[in-house]
Image (cartoon, rainbow, N blue to C red):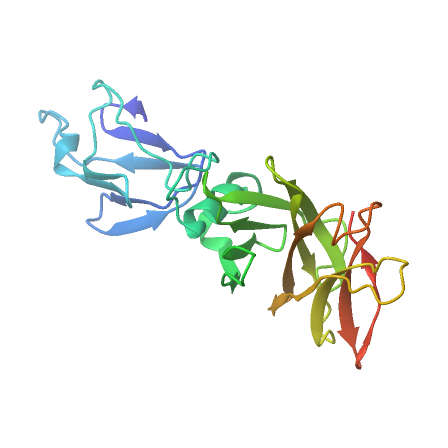
Amino acid sequence: MAALGSRQLVLFNPQRLPVEADRDDGEERTSTEPYQILSLRAGPDEEADWSSRRLVVPGSYDGPIPDPGSPPIQVRDRLGTDQPTPGQSLEDCVRAALPATKYAPPQQQEMVLRQEARGDTPRALAGRVAGSWATYCYDDPEGPVSGGNTLADAPVTDTRIVTADRKYSSDGPDVLIVVLMTVAPDVERVEIAARPHPQPGSVAPTAPCTLQDGLALCMLRSTYPGGIRDDGAVDVLPYVGGAATPLPVP
C-alpha cells in the first residue's frame, strides 16, 4: 500500500487475492485486480483518517485500512505455501499447487474430482484453473503430495496424459503410480494396468480410474520389480465403444 496524495492510496495485490475495501461512495466491493486506488473524502482542514474505512482479505485480515505511514500489515496468502505439511487438507494442497497468480485469479480455480482411498491407494483430489493447468494431491504420512502440468499444449478435450509420477518406497519394493489425464467426451471409462509378464498365466495388477468432467485420475500401487515388470511398463486404458487404446505411462 502506498500514498498517491493526502487522500488517495494505491493498494497493490500482485497475488490477485479477493480483497474487499470500503469505497468512497460507502459501498463495499470485492476485487482481485492487481491494484486498486482508494479515495477518502475530507474537508480542506480535516486530517485524513483511513482507520474509519475497512479492509478485508478473507481468512487473513479484517480491520481498518492502515495509514500509509504505519508499519505494513502482514497478509497471509490463503492459497498456501506450496510446501505440504502433515494434516494439511487436500483442498489447501490443490489450491497451493494451482498457479493462480500466473494464469487466473483464484475464483477460476475448481476442484474437479475426488477419489476416496481404495485398499492400497490413498485418498486424492484433482483440480484445474482456467483450462490452463491441472494438478492433483493425495494423502501421505508426511503431508499431501502434489503433481501437475500445463493444459496449454493440446486441446483439453483430447485424451492424453497431463502428468505422471512414480513414488518408490524407501523401505521396500513398493511403488505408487499416479497419472492425471484429460479425456475426450466419448471416453466411457479409464483403467490403469501394468503390462503382463511374459510367463504364461501371469496376472498384472490393474485399477479403475476416477473420471469426472474431462479429467481422469489413475492410481496403481504394486511391487517393482514383481507385480510390475522389470521394464516398468504400465498403460492407461481409455475405453471408447467398449474397446481400449493403451497409452504408455512415462
| Outermost front residue | 200
Up/down of 197 relative to 7, above or below: below
Image point (84%, 45%), residue name: 231
Work out whether residue 151 can be spotted: no
Work out whether residue 171 can be spotted: yes
* Count of number-bearing discs: 0
Residue 119 in the figure: left or right of residue 157:
left
Image point (52%, 55%), residue name: 122
Q: In the image shown, does 100 or 201 lie closer to the viewer?
A: 201
The picture places residue 185, in percent across and down from the top left corner, at 71, 73
| Outermost bottom residue | 241
Up/down of 137 relative to 201, above or below: above
In the picture, which quadrant includes the N terminus?
A: top left
The picture places residue 183, in percent across and down from the top left corner, at 71, 65
Residue 34 in the figure: left or right of residue 169:
left
The picture places residue 176, in percent across and down from the top left corner, at 63, 49
Q: Quadrant of residue 3?
A: top left
Q: In the image shown, does 6 or 138 lie closer to the viewer?
A: 138
Q: Quadrant of residue 172?
A: top right
The picture places residue 16, in percent across and down from the top left corner, at 44, 40
Residue 71 in the figure: left or right of residue 93:
left
Image point (67%, 45%), residue name: 165
